[in-house]
Amino acid sequence: MRHFGLFAAGIVMAAQVCAADAVQAQARRGDVIQRVAVEGTNRIDPETVGSYLQIKVGEPYDAAKVDQSLKALYATGLFADVTIRREGATIVVRVVENPIINRIAYEGNRKLKDADIGSEVPLRARSVYSKAAVEAAVKRILELYRATGRFGATVTPKIIDLPQNRVNLVFEINEGEVTAIRRIRFVGNRYFSDSSLREEIETKESAFWRFFGTSDVYDADKLAADREKLRKFYLSRGFADIRVVSAVAELTPDKTAFFITFTIHEGDRYRFGKIDVVSNLKGVQADQFKRGLRVREGRRFDGDAIESTIDSLTSVAGSMGYAFVRVNPIATPDREKKTVDITFDVREGPKVFVERIEIRGNVRTRDEVIRREMRINEGDAFNAERIRLSQRRLVNLEYFDKVDIQPREGSAPDKAVIVITVQEKATGEFSIGAGFATDEGVLGSISIREKNFMGRGQDLGASFFLSQRTIGADISFTEPYFLERNLAFGVDVFRRERDFTTEGGFGTRETGFRFRLGWRITEDLSQSVSYEVNDKRVRNISSTASSYIKAEEGKTTVMQVATTLTYDTRDNRFAPTEGFVVSSTVAYGAPPGSLHYVKGILRGAYHYTVTPGWVVSVLGEGGIVEGLGQRVRLNERFFLGGDSLRAFKFGGVGPRDSVTGDALGANKYYVLTTELSFPLGLPKEFGIQGRFFVDVGSSFDIDLDGLSGPPVLNRATPRVAAGVGVSWQSPFGPLRVDLGYPVVKFDGDKTQVFHFRFGARF
């Protein structure tokens, strides 16, 4: 055993000696790396170079790792050239450092400022120059110019070498001309002309009158949206099989123009066949959903009506306590009869709750300003109707050009993330106005306003206005969520002077302030209250004025408390096409003011779209004022005419001195207007609408207790005016022209056939 142990130990020692000899032999052959040398570095520490190497001292030489090391060093962007070579057991890494960019300049750019380009390119002064970064910068600059419609733009980078391995980088830009959309063509359209379809899409052919907008600038995203617009247009007009096969934009070889071609498969026109509702909700019968149907058997097929029905049925189910509902329209076309049967399948959807709300794109506007407009909050049950309502509220703020609300999957199947993406627009206004109106003569105004003051949603403004008959100024401030509650608090300070020489031979001056407080009772119902202190003066009375007006000369102080209740379902507050609004105002002239009265005004409007572009509007208003222990003074009476009753001058209808003809104002008035607005066949972007109108109204009754004078002309009989008009939302401001004829008038009424108003902002 002793001899065996000695024998085994000898074998182990021999193996170790052999292994050591083998390692030394490998080292002599250079198979094991004993040293790594870095050459050529100037600014960069050699250890930094070594950190990117995949080959290490003490490891066998591996060609694959050498290749990986080369790629890693090039990927840093720090080096213009890299070589790795083996010298025995030493690896030599030689690098040529990329230069440092000393300065970046842009030449030839006029349409885009240096700062606008510089903020978009991935290069900065004192950064490391690399060919890849310059190529990326050139690509981005070209994208910026293409976004402005300049597809012929070219960008040439120039490198100017400087001492100490530095360079100046100059981008020579040839902006070129705007690439026009020369022609938009349609293939496969039989029912609608090319011109009709061009009106439905956002992309437009270049024309001289479009120099104010960008609708004639090619945009691939806009073209994709236009395909969907065309599809919806056909679906709303009965074409259930519509397919927009392609939308191709061809750029001419000289890059001066685009030719765009939409290929369409129209199919046949259909009508609605059998309409049915299937309810899979417990305890809810299908008949209970019938009131939510917006489609009718026999009517022309309409995709918009189907979408409206889905929304309506969802709301009906919500009113019955079902927050999670899915409405699936099942269409069964009959190709021979050209009808489409629709079955609306209503069933409970998966229960989903809002995990969180993300807000993106708001730079100035604070998150809380957006969140407080949301009708759905984190933790609430997901509700598509409330999301649509929230989007409408955000749009009505007028802080954003675009508002997009999209649900995303949450961290669990029963959770959703609501992503709100907004694109802010300028909310500050500095405007100088000019124009002319038949009521006021030459108009002028200067105003400054910020509708989103400091991103808090507050409205702050000041204005000065001047015309041949009016001069005034006012300052206003509104906090829409006073004390972080659903209360809008506002303050107004004002001064106005007006000349009524033409109507009654007198002038007025008002100086005062007003406090306002408003709140929403429901989504459509709101109320406001106000308190106003107003120093009113009747002055500059003509020597030939009515004795009734001379008796009004002097100062009165009004301390008025008022409240207004408004119910508003209009689709758009500024250009309504559907819905109605009703408002009622009651005002009380209270002590210790010198005028004591009660005043009531009722207003209403209803709008209905007969067919796209054709809107019927019925508007009415009426008012009454009664003195409390005293007669109603001139400043508190109603004057009718001008904008309120076309074909009659301002103050042209109502109680009048039978001798001097001066308008005295009335204690009561009413006006009813029916108007049909319609397109004039011009491109939509012109913003020109025609209209027919009929105005019916009168102002009557006057309180002259304690005054003596000649008889007063006073008729409650309605006056009637009819006419036509044109409105133009011009780039220089809104223009409105009306030609009215007084169908019914009486002796003493003051008429005018032509009524014109134009204003500009710049």
Image: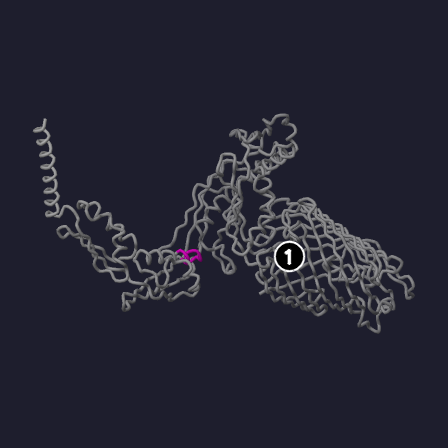
In-front residue for pair 285/353? 353
The amino acid on which the numbered mark 1 sits, given as a three-letter code, is Val
Q: Residues within 10 Å of mark 1 (few under 14, many from 20)?
A: some
Q: Residue at x 29, y 67 (%)?
A: 160
User: Horizontal and vertical percent for residue 342?
Assistant: 56, 30
Q: Which segment did they paint magenta? A: 143-150
- Which quadrant would the C terminus be assigned to in this image? bottom right
375 horizontally vs 185: left or right: right
- Which quadrant would the N terminus be assigned to in this image? top left
In-front residue for pair 342/298? 342
Where does label 1 land, which residue? 726
146 horizontally vs 208: left or right: left
User: Horizontal and vertical percent for residue 630?
Assistant: 88, 60
In-front residue for pair 163/34? 34
Q: Is residue 595 visible?
A: yes
Q: Residue furthest bottom?
A: 543
| Magenta segment includes 145 | yes
State whether residue 358 is above or below residue 337.
below
Secondary structure at badge 1 equals strand
| Magenta segment includes 454 | no
Q: Is residue 339 visible?
A: no
80 horizontally vs 508: left or right: left
User: Horizontal and vertical percent for residue 406?
Assistant: 52, 43
